[in-house]
């Protein structure tokens, strides 16, 4: 399943991002799409987890944040579903001429995240989004051919696919370049990647949802080398301890 939802809070969140960046950099600018040339390249250097310096200043959408609650409640209504939610949203700020994240992966199989979770992707800049999603049939085929270990198709684990495999993914996948809507998909069904980019920045949110009824028998500990601590993909750890509807009704 890939669903497109109304991106109801895009402008609101964009405004909060702009305010925060102005405060942190003490610089004025008029567009997020070309932010890098307005505030300087140093804000877009990458750490080992591929997060930019400016991106690491933008973890303000968390469990306590009212905008995040409203956004989640809106998604819950649009999906007609209650869920636990990722405690802190990742706001990504992709730099110019960026290609190191051009790596198809599956959050469940690659990172050991919960197989019943959903991914949410929300564009904040809506031009040059550069996102690619692979259909479920090809994702399933990849899992079957690798005996359920899609990392076998990585040339460098957690970083780069074999080029021939990446080319097939790109060919069967769908590119999203002009995107206003929010995308939601089953984490175990769609390989995805950010695509290489030229001289624009992309701002986007991503986070994960876990349905109220989910398998609680397994311990899903992260195997990502980018995380310094053990992350368990369960409510009260990586996910909120209350569902969004419980949170709103309290
Ligand atoms: Fe991902």
Image (cartoon, helix red, strand yellow):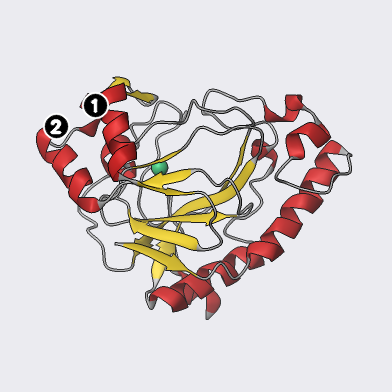
* Residue receiving disc 1: 153
**Percent position (x, y) of residue 193?**
41, 39
Report, in whole angstroms, how far the alpha carbon at label 1 lies from the one at label 2. 8 Å
* Image quadrant, ligand 1: top left
SS of the residue under disc 1: helix
Above or below: residue 32 compared with residue 41 = below
Q: Residues within 10 Å of mark 2 (few under 14, many from 20)?
A: few
Q: Is residue 221 visible?
A: no
Near-viewer residue (163 or 87)? 163
Relative height, residue 52 to residue 112 (above, below): above
Left or right of 87 in this view: 57 = right
Mark 1 near mark 2, Cβ–Cβ under 8 Å? yes
Residue 77 position (above or below residue 221)? below
| Residue 35 sits above or below residue 245 on the image | above
Q: Which circle marks residue 146 in the picture?
A: 2
The N terminus, quarter of image: bottom left
Residue at point 78%, 32% (across, down): 37
Camera sees residue 172: yes
Q: Where is residue 40 in the image (x, y as percent from the top left)?
A: 79, 29
Residue at 57% x, 68% y is 71
């Amino acid at each position: 399943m890939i669903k497109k939802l109304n991106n109801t809070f895009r402008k609101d969140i964009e405004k909060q991002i702009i305010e925060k960046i102005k405060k942190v950099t003490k610089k004025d600018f008029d567009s997020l799409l070309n932010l890098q040339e307005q505030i300087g390249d140093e804000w877009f250097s990458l750490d080992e987890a591929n997060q930019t310096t400016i991106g690491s200043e933008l973890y303000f959408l968390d469990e306590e944040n009212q905008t995040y609650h409203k956004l989640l409640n809106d998604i819950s209504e649009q999906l007609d579903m209650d869920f636990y939610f990722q405690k802190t949203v990742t706001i990504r700020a992709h730099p110019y001429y960026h290609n190191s994240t051009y790596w198809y992966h599956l959050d469940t199989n690659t990172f050991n995240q919960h197989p019943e979770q959903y991914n949410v992707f929300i564009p904040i800049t809506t031009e040059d989004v550069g996102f690619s999603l692979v259909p479920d049939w090809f994702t399933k085929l990849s899992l079957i051919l690798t005996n359920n270990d899609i990392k076998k198709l990585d040339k460098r684990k957690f970083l780069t696919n074999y080029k021939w495999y990446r080319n097939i993914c790109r060919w069967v996948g769908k590119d999203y370049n002009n995107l206003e809507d929010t995308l939601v998909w089953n984490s175990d069904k769609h390989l995805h990647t950010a695509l290489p980019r030229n001289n624009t920045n992309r701002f986007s949110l991503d986070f994960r949802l876990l349905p109220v009824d989910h398998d609680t028998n397994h311990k899903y500990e992260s195997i990502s080398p980018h995380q310094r601590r053990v992350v368990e993909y369960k409510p009260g750890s990586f996910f909120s301890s209350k569902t969004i509807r419980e949170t709103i009704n309290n």
